[in-house]
Image (spheres, helix red, strand yellow):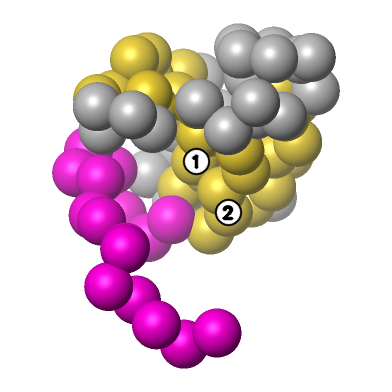
Amino acid sequence: NTDTSDCVELEGHQDSVNSIAYSLNGMTLVSASDDHTCRLWDVTNRAQLRIFRGATASVRRQVVSSPNDGTIFASVGN
């Protein structure tokens, strides 16, 4: 499917986003970026919920692992 009419832009990262993953319930999203952060988003209202800092290199991947809300995840950097 190439229809992008339902796509929205979430503003916050200061560099390229490398990966995103949704929580199992589809209500939250986590994004990983070259700005050395992961960010947690509320999908319904498109709000940034939290910034996770501390990586010393680009964050390449993350896996949402909590049962519902996406607040527990693992990330992997360079």
Q: Which residue is mark 2?
A: 19
**Residue situated in front as seen by the camera: 26 or 18:** 26
The magenta region covers 1-17
Residue occupying image coordinates x 24% and y 27%: 45
Can you see residue 59?
Answer: no
Residue occupying image coordinates x 32% and y 63%: 7
Q: Is residue 4 left or right of residue 66?
A: left
Q: Position of residue 67 (x, y in %)?
A: 79, 14
Indicate which disc residue 64 carries. Answer: none
SS state under label 1: strand
Q: Amino acid at mark 2?
A: Ser
Q: Position of residue 53 (x, y in %)?
A: 44, 20
Indicate which disc residue 31 carries. Answer: 1
Q: Residue furthest bottom?
A: 2
Q: Main secondary structure of the magenta part?
A: loop
Q: Is residue 70 left or right of residue 74?
A: left
Q: Amino acid at mark 1?
A: Ser
